Image: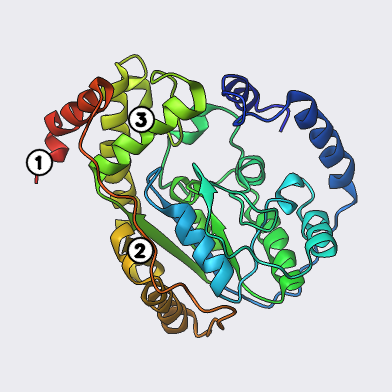
C-alpha cells in the first residue's frame, strides 16, 4: 500500500468527508505489514463460485453488489474486514467476532461506498497489491493474462476466505476487466456480472461525483480507460464523454474475448424493476455453468426506485452531454 503513492495523492485532493485521514492510513498500513507475514494460506481445495461484479462508474455496480451480498449465500469482504488488505483472513475473522453474521440490507451507499460496517467493500487495496497495480499506468491495459501475477497465491487466499465462509464469494472490482483471462483461467468457478446504464446518465453522474469528491469538475474520478493518456489534458466534458465511451467499448471487447457462459449482462433499469429476477439469472447461470446451486439467505426487495433521468440544468452538465453526443460512438 505504501508504494502506491498515487492513492495517497488522490486521497489528499478529496474534500472533507471523502478522504481518509493520512495518520489513520499510516497506522492501518503498519498494522497490515505486521500481520501479513504471520498469515498462512492452506486452502482445502474445495472449488466454490467466484462472482465478480463490474461496470462503468455510476452504473449500478454497488447496488448489484449489495443485493447479491445480502440475498445470496455467498461470502464477501465487508467494510471492517477491508481494513486488513494484507491480512484478509485476520480481517474476516475480526469482522465475524465484532459483527457476527449480520448483513446490511439497507442498500444505502455514497458514491460507490456502502455505509454500514457490515456493508460490502470493493477491497481495492487488496486487488491492487495482488495484481501489481502501483501506478495509473498499470490500470490502462485491459484483457491481459497477468503473467507476472502470482495467481496461485491469489487463488490460495481466496480459497481460504471461501473456506472461512463455507461458501463462494462475491467481489466487486473493475480490475477483473484488466485481467479477465487470468481471472477466468486461474480462479475457481468464475462468473463476471456486468451492469449497464444509460450512458448519458452515467456521464452526468460522473460529473456530479467529481464535484462532490473534489469540489471541482476538473479532477479525474474513478476508472481510467486505456485512452487516458490521450484525453488527460482535454477539458472535463471531453474527458467524461470519452471515459464513458472508451470504457464501454473496452469492456465489450473484454467480454467478447472470454467464454460467453462466464458473463451475465444486466441493466440498471432491469435491476431496479426486478431485483429477484436478476438474482435468479445469476443463480441459474452458476448452476448451469458450474453445477452449483447458490442458496437464498434473505428475500430480495420487490423493486428499487431508480435514480430518475434529469435534463442537463447547469452549463457543466450541458457541456458533458454535448461532448457525449458529438462522439461517433454515441450515435444510435
Examine the rendering and report whether any part of residue 278 can be seen.
Answer: yes
Mark nearest the camera among 1 and 3 is 3
Distance between the alpha carbons at the discs numbered 2 and 3:
22 Å
The residue sitting at 41% across, 77% down in the picture is 285
Q: Which comes sooner in the sequence, label 2 or label 3? A: 3
On screen, residue 207 versus residue 99, left or right, reads left
Query: Could you say whether the residue bearing mark 1 is in a helix, strand or loop?
Result: loop
Circle 2 residues within 10 Å: few <14, some 14–19, many ≥20? many
Q: Is residue 197 left or right of residue 31?
A: left
Q: Where is residue 20 in the image (x, y as percent from the top left)?
A: 68, 30
Q: Nearer the viewer, residue 128 or 325?
A: 325
Query: Residue 138, percent across and down?
Result: 51, 32
* Color theme of the render: rainbow
Q: Mark 2 points at which residue?
A: 272
Q: Point out the image quarter for the N terminus.
A: top right
Residue at 50% over, 22% down: 214
Label 1 to label 3, Cα distance in Å?
21 Å
Kindly tell me whether residue 265 is visible in this rendering: no
The dot on residue 331 is 1
Amino acid at each position: 500500500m505504501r508504494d502506491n503513492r498515487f492513492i495517497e495523492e488522490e486521497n489528499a485532493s478529496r474534500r472533507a468527508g471523502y478522504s481518509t485521514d493520512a495518520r489513520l492510513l499510516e497506522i492501518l498500513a503498519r498494522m497490515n505489514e505486521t500481520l501479513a507475514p504471520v498469515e498462512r494460506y492452506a486452502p482445502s481445495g474445495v472449488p466454490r463460485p467466484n462472482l465478480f461484479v463490474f461496470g462503468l462508474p455510476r452504473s449500478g455496480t454497488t447496488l448489484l453488489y449489495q443485493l447479491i451480498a445480502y440475498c445470496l449465500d455467498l461470502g464477501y469482504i465487508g467494510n471492517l474486514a477491508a481494513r486488513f488488505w494484507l491480512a484478509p483472513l485476520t480481517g474476516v475473522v475480526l469482522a465475524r467476532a465484532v459483527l457476527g453474521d449480520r448483513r446490511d440490507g439497507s442498500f444505502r451507499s455514497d458514491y460507490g461506498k456502502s455505509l454500514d460496517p457490515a456493508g460490502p467493500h470493493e477491497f481495492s487495496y487488496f486487488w491492487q497489491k495482488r495484481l501489481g497495480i502501483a501506478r495509473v499506468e498499470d490500470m490502462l491495459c485491459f484483457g491481459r493474462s497477468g503473467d507476472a501475477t502470482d495467481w496461485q497465491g491469489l487463488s490460495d487466499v481466496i480459497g481460504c476466505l471461501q473456506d472461512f465462509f463455507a461458501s463462494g464469494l462475491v467481489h466487486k472490482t473493475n480490475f477483473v476487466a484488466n485481467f479477465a483471462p487470468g481471472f477466468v483461467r486461474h480462479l475457481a468457478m468464475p462468473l463476471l456480472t456486468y451492469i449497464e446504464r444509460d450512458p448519458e446518465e452515467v456521464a452526468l453522474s460522473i460529473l456530479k461525483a467529481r464535484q462532490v469528491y473534489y469540489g471541482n469538475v476538473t479532477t479525474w474520478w474513478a476508472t481510467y480507460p486505456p485512452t487516458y493518456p490521450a484525453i488527460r489534458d482535454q477539458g472535463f466534458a471531453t474527458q467524461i464523454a470519452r471515459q464513458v465511451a472508451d470504457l464501454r467499448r473496452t469492456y465489450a471487447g473484454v467480454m467478447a474475448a472470454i467464454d460467453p457462459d462466464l458473463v451475465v449482462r444486466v441493466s440498471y433499469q432491469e435491476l431496479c424493476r426486478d431485483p429477484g429476477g436478476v438474482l435468479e439469472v445469476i443463480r441459474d447461470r452458476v448452476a448451469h455453468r458450474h453445477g452449483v446451486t447458490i442458496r437464498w439467505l434473505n428475500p430480495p426487495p420487490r423493486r428499487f426506485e431508480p435514480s430518475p433521468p434529469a435534463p442537463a440544468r447547469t452549463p457543466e452538465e450541458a457541456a458533458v452531454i454535448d461532448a457525449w453526443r458529438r462522439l461517433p460512438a454515441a450515435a444510435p
